[in-house]
Image (cartoon, rainbow, N blue to C red):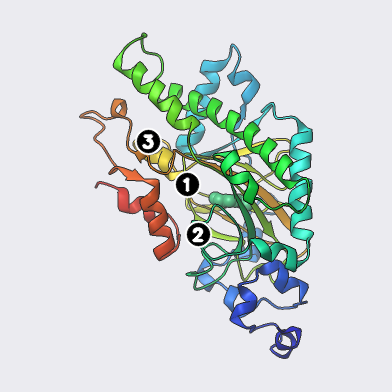
Amino acid sequence: MGLAAVESNNGHEVEESTYQRGVKHLCEGGIERVPRKYVFPVSERPHLGTERSDVCCGGNWNLKLPVIDFAQLQGSNRSQVLEHLADAFEEYGFFQLVNHGIPSQVIEELRSVGRRFFELPYEERCKYMNLDMRSPVRCGTSFNQNKDQILCWRDFLKLSCHSLPQHLPSWPSNPSDLREVAANYSLKTKFLYLKLMEAILESLGVKEIAPKSMEDQENDWMAKDLENGSQIVMVNCYPACPEPDLTLGMPPHSDYGMLTLLLQDESVQGLQIHHGGRWLTVEPISNSFVVNVGDHLEIFSNGRFKSVLHRVLVNSSSTRISFASLHSLSLDSTVRPLPKLIDEANPRRYKDTDFASFLNYISSVGHKGKNFLDTRKLT
Ligand code: OGA
Ligand code: NI
């Protein structure tokens, strides 16, 4: 297509097929304006200017999320850290995890390979592009590029990680170290996820029962189900955007799984969470993970922990790359509120659900806000 087409329209209209090739490709064609297809209605725009001007303490509505120290969680301070963790999940649905024990080399290698993947020429990246949301390994753009009326300013590489022997052969072989580096990272984050779920179960009060009780059997079953659960590593690339106040890197959404472990770009902020009726920018802390509650954990905890809306802003100066490791149960398991958390004072708040019906839902209507979770609520 069309550098000519882009220029002749002053960057405001481009052929549909160009959008489908992703934002990176669009930017490489050279644009000075955001094409209409990416322009959000005024009420949904980030309002960068306004939010900045009506804050007292300089700059943005920034938020320092509660910090959970993983090393302390594994040590003698565990019960206190568990309380903080539960408070953070009740109040924000998010915390930042420090001292997580994943070697910085593993993380640096992942950051490097993610960057190099998106620097590949379009012809290389497009080998992995397809429009099937269910496909376990794919490159794509926006959120659900088939259905989104307005596209968001994001390209992604999705890598299904469970099980590795099953999926690894279809991961990109270029850059040549991608498979090894991302597989190593996925195993390390899976370990961390399982440890965090153990802590979460404990903080929900479902682990301290004497041996051989029904609950113990349930816990054993749970441990297996968590271990066999699905894991997706999503590499998100948000190219620098000529008019960042007109569009979003990701629209407001909640994550569908149990937990998400997110590696933010350390030098470029962009993640905002919805809290107290406002959008707050999460300040990146170096060498940490942003951990958040997904829809399945909200259901599982019978509403005690909140799957909170978040979105991503883009900016005019730098490309931002983030890595989200999304964890859930296996595709065929049912997600339901833990029986132990239901009683007369706390009636069941959600219907049973499963991953497959969620995937059907998002591929048919697109994923906007928390609408799937809303269909699961018993009110
Ligand atoms: C996600 C997400 C935030 C970010 O991948 O679901 O919310 O900062 N990512 O990229
Ligand atoms: Ni998310």
Q: Amino acid at mark 1?
A: Val
Residue picked out by circle 3: 300
Question: How many numbered discs, if any?
Answer: 3
What residue occupies the far left of the structure in this picture?
Answer: 344
Q: What kind of residue is marked 3?
A: Phe
Q: Is mark 2 within 8 Å of ligand 1?
A: no
Q: Please report contact status of discs 2 and 3: CB closer than 8 Å, yes or no.
A: no
Seen at 52% across and 67% down, the residue is 44
Q: Which residue is mark 2?
A: 133
Q: Amino acid at mark 2?
A: Met
Identify which residue, 82 or 220, lies in the foreground: 220
* Above or below: residue 344 compared with residue 156: above
- Indicate the quadrant containing the N terminus: top left, top right, bottom left or bottom right: bottom right
CA separation in Å, label 3 and label 1: 15 Å
Q: Is residue 263 above or below residue 14?
A: above
Judge from the rendering whether residue 18 lies leftward or rightward of residue 197; answer left or right.
right
Q: Secondary structure at mark 3?
A: helix
Residue 305 pos. (x, y %): 42, 36
Please determine whether, in this image, residue 98 is positioned above or below residue 235.
Answer: above
Q: Which residue is mark 1?
A: 308
Residue 254, x across and y down, in percent: 48, 50
SS class, disc 2: loop
- Residue drawn at point x = 64 percent, y = 83 percent: 14
